[in-house]
Amino acid sequence: MEFTPVEWEALQLSLKVSFWSVVCSLPLGIAAAWVLARLEFPGKGILNGIIPLPLVLPPVVTGYLLLLTLGTKGPVGAWLHDTFGIVLAFRWTGAVVAAAVMGFPLMVRAIRLSLESVDWRLESAAATLGANRFFVFVTITLPLIVPGLIAGTILSFAKGLGEFGATITFVSNIPGETRTLPIAIYSFLQVPGSEGAATRLTVIAVTVSMLALVASEILARRAARKLHGANA
Amino acid sequence: MLEVDVERRLGDFHLAATFRSEGGLTVLFGRSGAGKSSIINMIGGLLRPDRGRIAIDGRVLFDSDARINLLPAKRRIGYVFQEGRLFPHMSVRQNLLYGQWFTPHGERYARFDALVEMLGIGELLQRRPATLSGGEKQRVAIGRALLSSPRLLLMDEPLASLDSKRKEEILPYIERLRDEIGVPVVYVSHALSEVVRLATTMVLLTDGTVVAAGPIGEVMARTDLFPAGSSFEGGAVLSAEVVSHDKDFALTTLRTAAGTIYVPQVDLPAGRSVRVHVHARDVMLSLRPPEGFSALNTLPGTITEIGPPEGAGVQVRLDCHGDVLLARLTRRSLDGLGLAVGRPVYAVIKSVALDRRDLGSSSPAAAARLEHHDM
């Protein structure tokens, strides 16, 4: 099957948005997971409640909140525009933010579970060998949570590919700019006689999602083998 | 020199330990829960004392008054854990080299090739920790700790999780470590046979306090530390030298200051220094040289001390030409024979009491001491 320019555009945009949402949220996700897994501080309960919020809120509400804060008239959005000239609303970068926010709780959860299963005794062993906290994290903790990083990344990426409600509310439906795969499917369904085009896009979406899952499975197995497996 | 003076409350348990060690291998000995592991965790910086001071060769690692508390990474102390704690995502070689990476060039005294050869782990370098046996893991863990060129090596019951065959496999390496590398070691154990075989200095802990500390021979020769019915079998530790083997009777002749001792044949070359642990319950006393008696070993000596009464029994300390022996008798025998301090007697030792397990090897002065920088 050959892609039409419209399909190709939507697919490329979806992959681009999901990719950048994962790249941008991964460092933050690791930091948040580490804070939740390792630190005790007042207000931890609040943070624990805020991070999963996008999972339970209606996506439209999340999108509207993003528009209120990050829109050109919103407090953060206005500041971003005045200081850096960055505009997020109605741009593909805004779609990246929406996808990142929606995928963040899934990513943090996967990394946090992985961090909590790391044997702290290995970290103290590294400390007695002369490694400071930073090196302990980079050489011991990080390699040991690679399976969790892979799981979190793939989950967040898949969530980004499927994200609809928050995206359409925050950055609308602009062909070539913010019309991702799900939004393109929705648009075709609004036009009588375009069911065939919508079905083709649906097949593409299913295929891409399955490929992502297969890739994650392969990567996770390879990582597990490296951690617990036989010889180097 | 290691100086330790620490206090720490852990729940209901109060730990207050003070001791010094002049190098060699110092064993912290006591039953589980006596506070041994807590003490070495404090030395290693993994547990913070409530109060106290820890210093190695005058370099202060912890001092509550001066508010000094070096991070573990800054202490330059190697730590061999009971469970090995090898990094599962690295090969044996990467594990070994991990600590070396963080050691300043001028302070590296451990040499990779020499250590790998000494520990017999050359074949394992490409393997992953998950594929190693328990004994191999502990040898790699010892190598990893030593390759960070530590000023002090801590070993927390490194043999406890191994079966007796594996223990025998590791013990010679620990002896070589003590004798050839010359790095001071603090070794936690609750097995008296390991103490007798390995210790230069012995620190005896009970319920969080130091009950006795000093050279192994002196501590083991005290009459008050291992009463009858205690879980540890007390008795003097003698230094001996293998003289010859008698193949016909399958005996080995040992020379000690106290005199000649025969033991069931052991597989050690003549001239080799060994330690002999003579259990107090296996020593009987006689006023005259015994005749028509099946025991092989009779050593003349003089009573120097009679310990406190323990039920029906009592421990008696003898001086045998400079060596110390302990004997456990009934108080009735003591009375019946009219034994008193200064009385010359003959100590009768059942030769079977000196089994292979109680024969630790101990090389004379540490040979080939590696270069050791101090700051």
Image (spheres, helix red, strand yellow):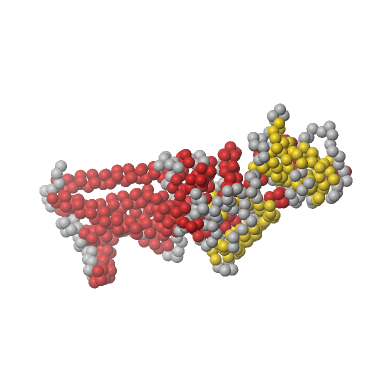
Residue at the image position 86 percent from the left and 39 percent from the top: B288
Residue A196 location, quadrant? top left
x and y, in percent, of residue A77 in the image: 25, 68
Residue at the image position 73 percent from the left and 42 percent from the top: B256
Q: Is residue A77 left or right of residue A146?
A: left
Q: Is residue A115 visible?
A: no
Residue B12 location, quadrant? bottom right
Residue A15 higher or lower than B67, as above or below: above
Q: Is residue B27 left or right of residue A4?
A: right
Residue B264 higher or lower than B331, as above or below: above
Q: Is residue B293 visible?
A: yes
x and y, in percent, of residue A179 in the image: 18, 56
In front of the other: A49 or B202: B202
Q: Residue furthest left?
A: A193
In front of the other: B244 or B78: B244
x and y, in percent, of residue A129 in the image: 49, 54
x and y, in percent, of residue A50 in the image: 36, 61
In front of the other: B313 or B189: B189
